Structure formats: structure tokens, C-alpha cells
Amino acid sequence: MRIAHCQFEPRSGEFDANLARVEEGLQAADRDRVEIVSFPECFLTGYQDDAERARQHAFSLDSPQAMQVLDLTSRFDATLLVGFNEIRDDKLFNTVLVAHRGHLLGRYSKCAAYMKFHTQGREFPVFERNTRDDGVVKFGVIICADGGYIEPARILAVKGARVIFAPHYNFISASNLIAHFMHVRADHIARAVENSVYFVRGNNVTVGEEQSIRGHAGVGYGDSYVIDPFGEIVARTQRHVEQILVCDIEPNAQRYNDHSWGVGKSIWSRQEFGDELDAAIREATK
């Protein structure tokens, strides 16, 4: 299976310009026979750090903007994962839509949303893609900070996901850059290994002046990568440049199927130690 991530720089509040970049990425994906292509978190709207601007540029899944995205995908074969600020029942969600050949397959909304004005998502859908060489592959989506927690990726893996895409929007202060870089990689390697899945960290990059984040100075450094179920980084982008990452993976390969205890170590661990964990949590949070 061939996957890709477009490590591009979004324009804050400029939907048409960002949609044009999505078209550019889809064209490249089709040329390279890519089957799933992702874009950074909130790519279509920009990732504003205040509620007023975020809501100003947000749109719903039944909006003209969403229809434009679906119409665009009808001309390409690659399944599209792209983020945006979503208005739903007057609430604001940080969402990734999943679309293929003009059809909306579903959405995932960030469950550990960093911004207080975002409503936390609590649904964990799994999607399918028919591939040229590897049959049907199940995949799921989490967003940025979600990858720092154990359960979101575990839930997707238990539901059968063999690939977990994690779109990011990072704009990190210079004083915390190395610590963030190391911590994020460690989290993602853990998610891949403990769930025996491919983990796709798809970041943004800041090439010009930052438009979305106004609350602090920082760096949008990129460093998108694919980690295999053994914890190895098998492909990555350069840092600080726009780049399309293309990677061939084998999500259904027998060597990656975790048969520990007959159910896989992540499920077995929860079955065996879940009651003790719940008791420990109750005690710790009295």
C-alpha cells in the first residue's frame, strides 16, 4: 500500500488558497499511485489560537466549502484526509474529514483538543481502503495531541485499524523545540509498537511568517514520518521545508500481526490489568 502526507503550510482563513494546495497534493498523489494522502491539522481553515478567528473561518460538513472538497476528490483516486475547524450544532470541533471519489466516508474530531474553545470528540471511527496489492486495509485517524495518550490509538487498533494517521499543526517555542521533538517521537514509537500498527505523523511547516498562531513565537518545523509496527522510522521528510512524503507500507503483513496471548498484547493487557488500573485511578483521584 502506498501512502503520502503533504507537509505544506496552510494560509490562515484562506480556504480557496488552501483548497488549491489540496488539489496540488491530490495531483501528485495520483501521479505516484498513492492510495491514501493526508494533510496537516486544520489545513483548510488554518489553526487559529483564538475562538473568534477559529469560528470565523470554520464551516460545517453540509456547507458549500465541504461540497467543494468532495467535488475535488471526485477527480482523483487517492483517499483524502484533511483537517479543518468544524461548526457542528453551534459547537466548534477540530476535525479531519475522510473522503474518496466525491463521497464523504466520515470524520474524526480531536479527543484531546488543546484549545479550550474546541469541543472534545469522543467517536473513534475506522475506515477501509481497497488497495491494489494488499486487499482491504483498515485505518483510523487521531489528531496531534491525541497521540500523546494511550487509549485513542488503542481503541482504533482494537477496532482493526492497521494504520493510524495523526495530522499535526505544530508551532513550537524555540526554547522547547528539542524537548518537543524528542517527546513526540517517543510517544509515536510507543503507539506503533504497543498496538502493532503503522503510525503516520503528518506535520505542517512554517516557511513564511506564521499567520494562525498569535499567542506566542515559535517554529513550525515539519518532521513528518512513518513508523512501522516494530518502532522503526521507515520514511520521513526534511525539516523546515514543504515536502510530500511518499511511503510504501505493508499493513497486512503477517509479521506485523501481534498474536501475543492469542488476542494481541494491547487487548490482553487491558483485559488482565484493567480492573487494577481502574482501582488505582479511583484511589489517585479521590
Image: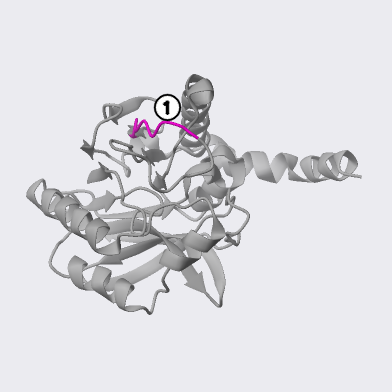
- At a point 23% along the width and 49% down the height, the residue shown is 134
Residue 253 location (% of width, % of height): 31, 39
Answer whether residue 1 is visible to the viewer in this image.
no
Indicate yes or no whether the magenta region holds residue 200. no
In the depicted view, which residue is nearer to us: 51 or 5?
Answer: 51
- At a point 42% along the width and 43% down the height, the residue shown is 169
Residue 205 location (% of width, % of height): 33, 37
- At a point 63% along the width and 54% down the height, the residue shown is 116
- At a point 16% along the width and 61% down the height, the residue shown is 77
In the depicted view, which residue is nearer to us: 110 or 32?
Answer: 110
State the quadrant of the N terminus: top left
In the depicted view, which residue is nearer to us: 249 or 44?
Answer: 44
Report the residue marked by disc 1.
231
Residue 66 horizontal side relative to residue 286, left or right? left
State the quadrant of the C terminus: top right
Residue 26 location (% of width, % of height): 17, 55
Indicate yes or no whether the magenta region holds residue 219. yes
